[in-house]
């Protein structure tokens, strides 16, 4: 069965797999130069016009697999040599131009960027065009179109532009590391750094729990990702990799629910703090609204804190669908509790780097979290959990008015209303990815049924209440 949505994901996976395979065998330093030949064997290109360029791009992917550019604080990077196939983009006059006599487009342009040829057809001078769109608005035939690159279309906060060589350029001051551009780039020219080598090092150095224990903290969205296997086999596979313990991040979600419910009752109005991309968006674009953001740590951080309070020497490896978690890892409030972050794409590469076929394994059942903690992975899950928490805390008299926002565009609308005191609600559940974490850009798949997979996984919990999960 095909494990990934796109061939780009498969290419990333193969580079990660071979990098990890050599790291397990302590042959990475001497074998690193061989990886491009492993990924692109033979003398004929399979993806690019030239075999040498193809292998050069794979070499750049290997660098990302080993942690990427240490001078770039962002976890999202552009592979410039791979970013050369997209059109320049911007406003273009299409074949729909009828050469009309009105020439409203030329009249509307304040920069003299539009000229009319001998056939009365309009042309745009890119050196003068300011991309204002005035010409497109007045054209009666809709003959002027704004062609944006896939990465620019995917980025809803305008963090991607083009440099002087027309390669994608990321504005780190705007970027929230959601990874939407990574998933949408048809050439895989934008990718995220991997910390897969850190995870391997922790597992190897722990010596099977003799020096310290390495904990895999797995996000509940995993139930929607490894669709070719059973959920319990995914957990057993983590043990086969060498993790000493496996813990549900959903337990952290239960803890977050309880704390955010208390904070909401105290403040009267609150936004969630679970999604690091959403919090980053508020921080960068709506800093005046930061007092409304919950002070509670995210489920990833709070479960890491819980583990390290029980076992101070532990190494905690978060595994989930989110690229923004890699940026959250760098926060001072989070760094003490989580040692590194892997995506589900990277977990698949780890399995295959050790030739672990999880479909052949027995199932291991986790029982750390409640149904409500597990459904955090889908949009509306946190809201449902807060409703339950209100009941368990005996706060039915508090009128909860949730505003569920998935996708940055919906989050923006809610935040603008909150800023102007026009929001019809008192609790904003903000998630950068449409559909919630099940659509995270570090996942194997973005299938529509992912939400139902998470819902069904939640229902398998033997823990009936949030309080029971926390006290357990």
Image (tube, helix red, strand yellow):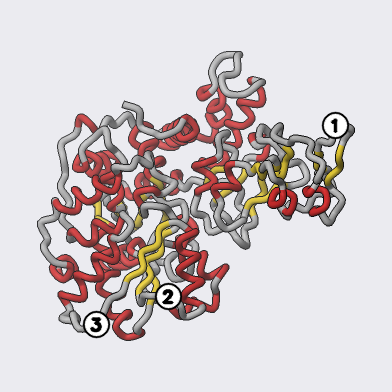
Image quadrant holding the N terminus, namely top left
Mark 3–mark 2 CB contact (< 8 Å): no
N-term-proximal mark, 3 vs 2:
3
Q: Residues within 10 Å of mark 2 (few under 14, many from 20)?
A: some
Q: Residues within 10 Å of mark 3 (few under 14, many from 20)?
A: few
Residue 437 visible in the snapshot: yes
The Cα–Cα distance between marks 3 and 1, rounded to whole angstroms, is 69 Å
* Disc 2 secondary structure class: loop
Query: Is label 3 or label 2 in front?
Result: 2
Task: Return the residue at label 2.
Answer: 423
The residue sitting at the right extreme is 118
The Cα–Cα distance between marks 1 and 2, rounded to whole angstroms, is 53 Å
Identified at 86% across, 42% down, the residue is 115
Identified at 79% across, 54% down, the residue is 108
Residue 204 vs 28, above or below: the answer is below
Task: Return the residue at label 3.
Answer: 398
The disc at residue 229 is none
């Amino acid at each position: 069965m095909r494990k990934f949505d796109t061939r780009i994901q498969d290419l990333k996976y193969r580079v990660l797999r071979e990098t990890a395979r050599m790291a397990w065998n302590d042959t990475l330093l001497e074998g690193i130069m061989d990886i491009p030949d492993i990924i692109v064997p033979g003398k004929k290109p399979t993806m690019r016009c030239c075999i040498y360029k193809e292998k050069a791009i794979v070499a750049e992917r290997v660098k990302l697999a080993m942690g990427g550019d240490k001078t770039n604080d962002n976890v999202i990077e552009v592979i410039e040599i791979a970013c050369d196939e997209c059109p320049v983009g911007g406003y273009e006059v299409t074949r729909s131009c009828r050469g009309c006599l009105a020439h409203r487009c030329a009249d509307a342009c304040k920069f003299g960027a539009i000229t009319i040829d001998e056939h009365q057809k309009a042309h745009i001078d890119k050196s003068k065009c300011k991309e204002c769109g005035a010409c497109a608005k007045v054209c009666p035939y809709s003959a002027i179109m704004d062609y944006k690159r896939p990465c620019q279309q995917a980025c809803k906060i305008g963090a991607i532009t083009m440099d002087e060589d027309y390669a994608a350029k990321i504005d780190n001051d705007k970027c929230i590391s959601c990874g939407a551009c990574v998933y949408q780039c048809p050439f895989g020219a934008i990718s995220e750094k991997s910390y897969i080598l850190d995870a391997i090092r922790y597992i190897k150095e722990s010596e099977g729990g003799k020096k310290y224990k390495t904990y895999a903290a797995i996000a509940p969205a995993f139930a929607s990702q490894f669709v070719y296997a059973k959920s319990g086999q995914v957990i057993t596979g983590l043990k086969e990799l060498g993790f000493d313990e496996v813990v549900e991040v959903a337990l952290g979600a239960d803890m977050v629910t309880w704390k955010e419910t208390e904070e909401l009752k105290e403040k009267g109005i609150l936004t969630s703090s679970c999604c690091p991309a959403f919090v980053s968006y508020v921080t960068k674009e709506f800093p005046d609204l930061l007092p409304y953001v919950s002070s509670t740590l995210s489920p990833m951080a709070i479960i890491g804190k819980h583990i390290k309070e029980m076992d101070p020497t532990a190494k905690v490896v978060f595994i989930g669908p989110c690229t923004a978690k890699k940026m959250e890892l760098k926060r001072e409030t989070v760094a003490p509790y989580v040692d590194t972050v892997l995506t589900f794409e990277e977990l698949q590469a780890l399995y295959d780097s050790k030739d672990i076929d999880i479909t052949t394994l027995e199932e291991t059942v986790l029982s750390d979290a409640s149904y409500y903690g597990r459904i955090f992975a889908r949009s509306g899950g946190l809201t449902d959990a807060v409703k339950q928490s209100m009941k368990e805390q005996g706060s039915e008299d508090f009128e909860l008015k949730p505003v569920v926002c998935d996708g940055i565009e919906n989050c923006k609308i809610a935040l603008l209303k909150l800023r102007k005191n026009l929001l019809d609600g008192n609790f904003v559940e903000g998630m950068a990815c449409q559909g919630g974490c099940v659509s995270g850009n570090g996942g194997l798949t973005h299938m529509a049924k992912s939400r139902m997979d998470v819902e069904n996984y939640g229902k398998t919990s033997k823990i009936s209440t949030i309080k029971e999960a926390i006290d357990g």
